[in-house]
Amino acid sequence: MAATQAGVKRFYVIFAVLALGGLGVLGYLLLKPSTVSIPANVAIQVSDTSGFRGYVKGTPDAPVEITEFADYQCPFCQTFATLQMPTIEERLIETGRVRWRYRDFPLQQHQFARLAAHSAACADEQGKYWDQHQRIYEGQSEWAPARDAGPIFRNYARAAGLDMNRYDVCMKAGKYAGRIQASYNEGVRLGVSSTPTLLVSGRLYRGRFDSDAIIKLVDSLAPRRK
Amino acid sequence: MIYRMSAALLSLIGLFVSAYLYLYKMGRIGSLACGSGGCETVQLSQWSRFAGLEVALIGVAGYAGLLLVSLAALQPGLAARRWPTRVLVVLAGLGVGFTIYLTYLELFVINAICRWCVASAVIIVSILIVALLDQRRFSRIEAS
């Protein structure tokens, strides 16, 4: 009986060591910091900006171009992207009246804004920019308070049907860090200081917008054909 | 007792393997540690869900059940009872059946092998073997 009791005791010691070890490994995996971070102080190469001036929606011969400088973690940008953009797309972009240009302007106080912009840039590489863009904005309340938003963006990328090996390589390399910084720098040069900011016919419009105001603005710049 | 102890330890390892795969599926731990890359192919395929549930979550539930039964079977009041072993045989048998189905999918439908799924397959088969050995031990005691 004594031998059995010793055996049971030994079993519980092994069990406890195994349980603690397993919990420790899972805990480490859950708590470890994001393996991907997108640097802001990156040296911008010519290749980062050549031929790229933002993500564009709409026809090239639209009479009005609107450039939006936005931050994925900015709440106003989120409501604009999810509530106002569908109407703008339907009334202005799809009708050929406006060409929309989206430019990244990740604010320093938003810890995941640059990572989100980079995730969308990596999706662009596979022709899924707007899909990922929309998923990131729609999921803002999910990832913004998270300890590590990287895996959540990765899930969006997977749901968007991206080749995950290519996505991971792109994210780990920080391939578009320079492009994002170049976009930010251009915004600063133009006078952008907050998000969202719209650039329409050389003039900056800051703050909260609704689709009606933008439709009126476009009407004033390029009246509808009767 | 040694068989039930082995079943408990194996169930604990299986529980951690399933939990690891489930946390990956939930996007909580980034990428999987899987040299071949087959793990992601399997985990991201349409076959990673069964009857509307994540297969990894079914694994977590299954191994948790096996762990509870095998730990209960070690308690003094149940150590000499045969029914916990029968429950282990049934649960592990169901697990092995499900594993055979999943391995078939990996080999012939998805055409990719997930090392963590292979590890789980080895664990569930081992649990069934030790449960059957315990069953045989009881049969011998009853026969003598």
Image (cartoon, coloured by chain):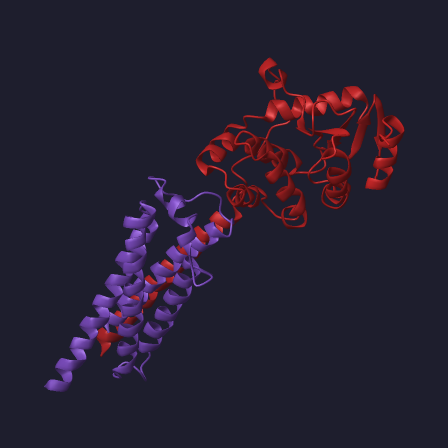
Chain colours: A red, B purple
Residue at the location (32% across, 56% down)? Answer: B102
Image location (x, y in percent) of residue A173:
50, 28
Q: Is residue A194 visible?
A: no
Compared across the picture, whether A180 is left or right of A11 comes to right
Compared across the picture, whether A23 is left or right of B122 comes to right
Relative vertical location of residue B115 with respect to residue B87 in this rendering, above or below: above
Image quadrant in which the N terminus of chain A is located? bottom left
Front residue (pair B114, A222): A222
Relative vertical location of residue A124 with respect to residue A43 in this rendering, above or below: below
Residue at the location (49% across, 44% down)? Answer: B30
Image location (x, y in percent) of residue A50:
62, 15
Image location (x, y in percent) of residue B82:
25, 82
Image quadrant in which the C terminus of chain A is located? top right
Relative vertical location of residue A61 with respect to residue B130 in this rendering, above or below: above
Front residue (pair A160, A173): A160
Residue sitting farthest toward the top = A46
Residue sitting farthest toward the right = A220
**Residue B80 picture quarter:** bottom left
Total marks placed: 0
Image location (x, y in percent) of residue A15:
34, 64
Relative vertical location of residue B9 with respect to residue B43 in this rendering, above or below: below
**Residue B51 picture quarter:** bottom left
Compared across the picture, whether A133 is left or right of B62 comes to right
Residue sitting farthest toward the front = A226
Q: Is residue A106 visible?
A: yes
Residue at the location (63% across, 38% down)? Answer: A133
